[in-house]
Amino acid sequence: MWQRYTFYDFRVIAHYLGVLLTLVGIGMIVPLVVAFATKEWEPAHRYLFSVGLALTLGSALRMARIEPGRLNRQQAIAITSFAWLAAALMGAVPLVMSNHYGSYLDALFDAMALFTTTGASIISQPDHLSYADSIWRLVTMYSGGLGLVVVAMSFGVFGAVTDSSLYDSEGHSEHVLPNVVQTAQFTIKLSLAVIGAASVVLIACMLAHGMTLARSLFHGVFMAVSSFMTVGLSPNSTNVAYYHSVVIEVVLMVLMLLGSINFSLQSEVIKGRIEVFLHDMEIRSGALWIMIMLAIFAASIAGVALLSNAPTMLRMGLFTFVSASTTAGFATLTSNQLNAVFPSGALLVLAIAMAIGGSSGSTSGGIKLRRIVIIGKSAIETMKITASPDSARIQTSYFHIGRMRLGAAEVKEAMTVFIMFVLVYIVGALAGIALGYDAVDALMESIAMASNGGMSAGITSAGMPIALKVIYIAEMWAGRLEFVTLLAVGIKILVSCKPRLASRAQKGDR
């Protein structure tokens, strides 16, 4: 039986959504300062208005009176679910006021793609964006990559009500430290350290290629954040191909791979426990998965004329595959070139790689390697039980930051999320096919949205049907939350409204 939300629950949800909207408004101050510093007066007006709107709406929602105490799980999953939608709705305001979007829906599409780190964009010429707009993209990519709740927790926004319900409902599976607030703060510190070090390297590379210091600073930081947060956006229209640098591509690949590794495992390396990292099932299964899929991908593009020589094939093919398997979405080719150069078999391999994604507890999207391994081990256990005598007791274990026993609850969770991802992949693909797009392109685009991979097959554009824009926005939102949380909240809200509908019907009969 589904537990209904009470009126008090809705007040609590509204109050903390107001807190998060206030945080979004504070985040908009960063591009506002940049606009003033660079004398971009038109963006300055947009962000000044947006800051005021966010703070006003946030303050209004925060006025919903609540009693002191911890959030229960039902309230936490609702706050987490609607936080992403609220952030995207507000984040789209300064974007739609610019001349780069034809409608609010287009701006909302890009805002959702930024916050969910999907990296897809309707803008065809990001080179023409103001510095303020580019910085806003940077802020949304970073906060979305870490998780809105993680960012809020690290600043103590939730105060004494913070517990694991909020953290877990955003799709974070492990705690690096016993306290969730400390875990959130550790994640931010680790990400800043990696991004800082990578930015220095990228800035040096860009200076060596003749870029000015100012442009090198901007591009270096932007690409470091975009790659480690597995967003895949670039401040220019030709994406990574703009730099014409093998060294930069190698640095970006390293960052993408780091971003797709569980933060808990990275903390084990920092603590000097290398053996824990090397024996972990996600690292071992991930390495095996990448080698197998990379071999298939290499075989599928071996006959492509443009990739006939080994260095070109290694450079372009390896970068594209790493970008897809980490759900980053970077490309050295445009969407049209991707379709023209790669055969349908290669595109299908990239789609499958995006569909699975990287490790749990990372910035990567998709189904996650951990769930695939758990489902596989459960299947093997089932076969062992079938082939064993009734008296035999079969127990399966795996190594994930320590030896763990396979339980029914985690198998159920893994299967549920797996099925939901596959269903959404299929539904999104069928929607694209129904609207006249090629089947392989529609499947790849749907997977790119729901897995937050963002590697487009060419469908995403300002001219695509409105229905498809709405479907893709929903896929990005639900995929970032891994479906269960959002669907559970949706059903609970419908159940909560049912008695009211019934009482109205009874009054009508009278």
Image: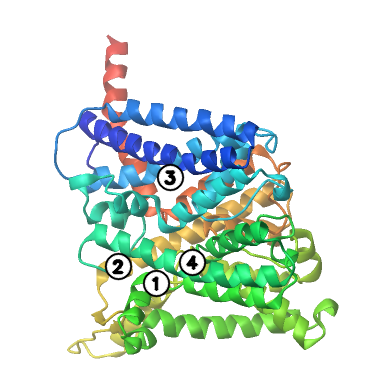
Q: Which residue is mark 4?
A: 196
Give the mark nearest the N terminus, 1 or 3: 3
Q: Are marks 2 and 1 in contact (CB under 8 Å)?
A: yes
Is any part of residue 467 visible from this angle? Answer: yes
**Callout 4: 10 Å neighbours few (<14), some, many (20+)?**
some
The residue type indicated by label 4 comes to Gly
Give the Cα separation between the discs numbered 4 and 1.
19 Å
Q: Which residue is mark 2?
A: 174
The residue type indicated by label 3 comes to Trp
Regarding mark 1 in the picture, which secondary structure is present there? loop
Give the mark nearest the N terminus, 4 or 1: 4
Image coordinates for residue 489, horizontal then vertical, percent? 34, 43
| Numbered badge on residue 378 | none
Q: Which residue is mark 1?
A: 262
Image coordinates for residue 374, horizontal then vertical, percent? 36, 75
The residue drawn where x is 33% and y is 72% is 264
Give the Cα separation between the discs numbered 4 and 3.
26 Å
Regarding mark 2 in the picture, which secondary structure is present there? loop
